[in-house]
Amino acid sequence: MFDFGIWTSWIHSQLTALMPEGLAIFLECVAIGICLLLMYVVIAIIMIYMERKVCAAFQCRLGPTRVGPWGSIQVICDVFKMLTKEIITVRHSDKFLYNLAPYLVILASVMAFACIPVSRGLEILDFNVGVLFFMAASSIGVVGILLAGWSSNNKFSLIGAMRSGAQMISYELSIGLSILTIIVLTDTMQFSEIVMRQADGWFIFKGHIPAVIAFIIYLIAGNAEVNRGPFDLPEAESELTAGYHTEYSGMHFGLFYVAEFVNLFIVSSIAATIFLGGWMPLHIPGLDGFNAVMDYIPGFVWFFAKALFVVWLLMWIKWTFPRLRIDQILTLEWKYLVPIGLVNLLLMVVVVVFKLHF
Amino acid sequence: MENNTAIKDRITAIEPAAVWSEAGDGLFKVPAASFRHLAEQLRHAEGFDFLRSLTGVDEGEEGLGCIYHLENTGTGENVAVSALDTDRENASLPSVHDLWKGAGFNEREAYDFFGIKFIGHPDLRRLYLRDDWKGFPLRKDYDMSLNPLNMENEEANDDSPSYVMTKDGGYILKRHPLFEDQEYVINIGPQHPATHGVLRFRVSLEGEIIKKLDVHCGYIHRGIEKLCESMTYPQTLGFTDRLDYLGAMQNRHALCMCIEKAMGLEVSDRIRYIRTIMDELQRIDSHLLFIACLSQDMGALEVFFLGFRDREKVLDILEQTTGGRLIQAYNRIGGVQADIHPDFVKKVKEFIKYMRPKLQEYHEIFTGNVIVQQRLEGTGVLSREDAISFGATGGTGRASGWACDVRKRHPYGVYDKVDFKEIVLDNGDCFDRYMVRVKEIEESLNIVEQLIDNIPEGEYLMKTKPIIKLPEGSWYSAVEGSRGEFGVYLESRGDKSPYRLKFRSTGLPLVSCIDTISRNAKIADLIAIGGTLDYVVPDIDR
Amino acid sequence: MKRNVDIKSMKYEDFNDNEYIEQMLKELRENGTNVIVGCLDDVIEWGRSNSLWPLTFATSCCGIEFMAIGAARYDFARFGFEVARASPRQADFIMVAGTITNKMAPVLKRLYDQMADPKYVVATGGCAISGGPFQKSYHVVNGVDKIIPVDVYIPGCPPRPEAMLYGLMQLQRKVKAQRFFGGVNKSISEKEYEKLMREDTNKAEDNRDYDESGLA
């Protein structure tokens, strides 16, 4: 497996040779920040394009075809349009919070995005409580959404924001529980370490029954966490026109729009990292030849393949299922997912204590 | 109308002042003062529980008034009663909203158009026009220049007026608040994706729960009935297609039937067959769109596209013969516009073969989905009594256990010759309303299948005079539209254009019952209720 | 820099009934533009024209055909009209599909005002263009161009989906002939616009209980 750490430490050593270490680290931070944002945008564009094509395929349509081959640069058009569109500020709105909200959402999204280990040595934020940090960072987003709904001075927005608050805070619990289940198995909260421990088999195989249950709970809760169908109540088009971002236009709306899709990617890639081995190739203990062949495929290919597979799964769900109702969403979480998650956690502890895992 | 002899005697016994007038279908003329007594007796003693249609009329010298078409759903008896008030300035009639709930909105309509004050009506606001509208447009002496285009935003009225009778025979105006100051009122529509057009609800919420709902119509009120009064009979046909554009064939069929009845024209069997087949194809088209829109409202976008995919197949068939996709302009007085296309029979058969398995697909993707069932079952329950009282016909009524199919009650076309089931379910909830329509697609396929091979030879257009004049009188005829009973009330004074032409809206009764069935439901339920009631807004507003 | 307009999949000759755009293009070509500004304009207009998001707005019959062009057979997503937004703030053009009545007129105007610039209007069907069959009615606006500025008219009652697609591609072409920098297409200058806005604000200040929270 190629380790990108070689490059990064080489760059670091070159820079420290030229300048004092503080400046070098500062420069590195800037460069990494730029790379991160670029990657963020690229992922967003890929996700939006994928969404359009996938949903078109489910709906017996073609999706965008005119701009670029197979409509592949359609999203870039949208970006140009969004950037040059007027940003309306609503009178009687709370202007400071109104303008702050989209940036809070995007900030939470970028911070969570930075946690993702793309390949060996390509982790940006990687420390011993990485999972905790990820959970904390991603939950800032709900503040942004609540602020957006509140400050817009629009009743639809407010209802959307309240729904979103109730929904996201509830489902965070399930996400936490299902990740915790795996942490019990790994005894580490560092993402790179979690991936490394899956070298002899992904956790979904190693943890067998409790891991599969945790994976399913994670998918459901993760889908709810990013407000996508069938959990898209906060922006339910047919009920609340556009939910919490009803009053946002231009790039402010664009930020919400982008954050939604990147959040989908983040949730999927965390699922891929924790349950499906992240960038770790498929290894079957005992088959050394097979493992060696698998190792020739670069880590980031594995990572993106797995993450996009999960994304595709979530898109499939979104375009097939109708929307739930708010009371059903809360019932599902508090009466089913949380108890199941707790019991599942207990089950995993039993599995670990008695060494029943592979 | 049928069975008139027996009912005539009974009505004269109840109210000696009632006069039978023979012209056309015939109706009883009752003075306004004794109308309330007759109405109560008809409702409670005689069991006329279904108000088919309430038509405001301006009879010039004779005054302003209303014509009530009543039906006894038990025995199938029909009667028409007209009540006129001679005082044009202060026309008033006793309200019957407590006898037939459906009268509530219809009386508001009559007040809106004719300025008839209904004494005792709890909420006598204008239904279609703006509150600051001057004059009453359907009166014969209405001046068009009174109301230029007003671009000021309309203020929503928060209290409703009502006229209450005093002891000395006069009446006073009272105002009741609609919404209290503390209530959290949100405004859904007129531009809102879930209202299927430009309907507007004002909803008072407590959290997500609906406490009260106030319907505002009229955002697409186009004054069709008034326009018809200045047009010749063939010209009036054009408007029917644009009323309920998903039941274009059926609507036009109703008006043609009414005019033909008035002319005494008997159409050939071929025409009846073609009209019936076209009606059923249109019904399939409409129900497919219903499924599509319902699923879109509920967020399951895939089914939306499936519905449209199959709908295009129906439109292809219709287009080949009629030339139009949505607005076909196919029926004419005394027949149809053009003979069926040579490929028509073949195409229809292919379609039937194609459609049956596709219905299964809908069941697999949508009906069987647990979320769909959870959301539709038990929400928005409309009881049978309420359905009849509101006059909610069509799939909505049949889902509540009321066998209200006009095709069975008053057969027209060739429905008496075909064998088909009337789908009646009992629960009256959203899920049943959905299921009724899906099953009706199957029944419609059956009907078309029975007829398609047996279209007899004959004329497709009967010879009529170049200028059509109808004798004096009034007629009512109805068809089973895609979403309920679509009736046409035609009053002629012997001219080449109608004196009064009223379309019984299929959607107005459906909308009038929304407040009742959506109380204590959630906002998301309101969307499901609106979707399953399946109203078309231009048909409500006319 | 000379400018030309090209819409993929539709030949230039096929747009042969629109002298107004020809005129605009001629003007642009004659005067020419700065290379940098011109290139930026090109990019922005290319983006805008290929990413026109409609407002989900329909009043009557034409609305069903509008839904039909979104559906599988006609699929306007191919041209980038895909994302129909329910909130006017996020939509780029409003397709007036159906009759506009006197009661609806202020609402439509308000919807148009709520949209963010650049915004376009497509009048679809006889009713929206001139009142159509309901022209003599007491409650129908005879053409939406009496209320809001219209960019493209699509005749028909209702227009076939193909006609609607053609109309939307005409709109794309029109958008491409605009200039982002320079404000050629603004019928009023910035100053006048600001003055109007100030008047509007003062008017709204006068009656403060005016509720602008709800949409329309």
Image (cartoon, rainbow, N blue to C red):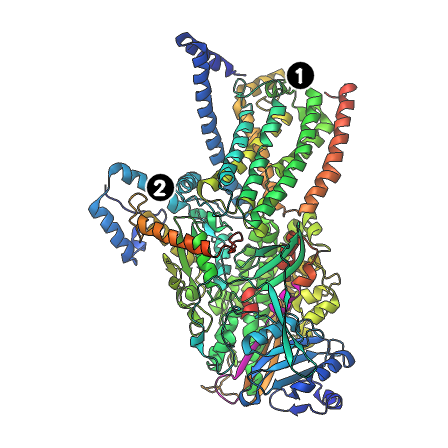
Residue at x 40%, y 56% (from the top left corner)? C121
What is the distance, in whole Å, between disc 2 and disc 1 at their CAs? Answer: 57 Å
Q: Given the image, what chain letter belongs to the residue carrying mark 2? A: C
The residue to which callout 2 is attached is C44
Residue farthest along the left direction in this orientation = C30
Which image quadrant for residue A16? top left
- Image x and y of residue B88, in percent: 55, 85
Q: Is residue B454 above or below residue C199?
A: below
Residue placed most toward the observer, A298 or A259? A259
Choose between B351 and B276: the one closer to the eye.
Answer: B276
Q: Residue A220, position in %: x, y?
A: 66, 37
Q: Are marks 2 and 1 on the same chain?
A: no
Q: Is residue B218 visible?
A: yes
Residue under label 1: A286
Amino acid type at circle 1 is: Gly
Q: What amino acid does circle 2 point to? A: Ile
Chain of residue at mark 1: A
Quadrant of the image containing the N terminus of chain B = bottom right
B364 or B201: nearer the eye? B201
What is the magenta range? B493-514
In the depicted view, which residue is nearer to us: C184 or B177? B177
**Is B505 included in the stretch rendered in magenta?**
yes
- Is C75 rendered above or below residue B63? above
Point out residue B97 in the picture as x, y percentages from the top left corner.
Answer: 68, 74
User: Label 2: few (<14), some or many (≥20) within 10 Å?
Assistant: many
**Label 1 Cα neighbours within 10 Å, binned few <14 / some 14-19 / many ≥20:** few
Secondary structure under badge 2? helix
Quadrant for residue A69, please give it.
top left
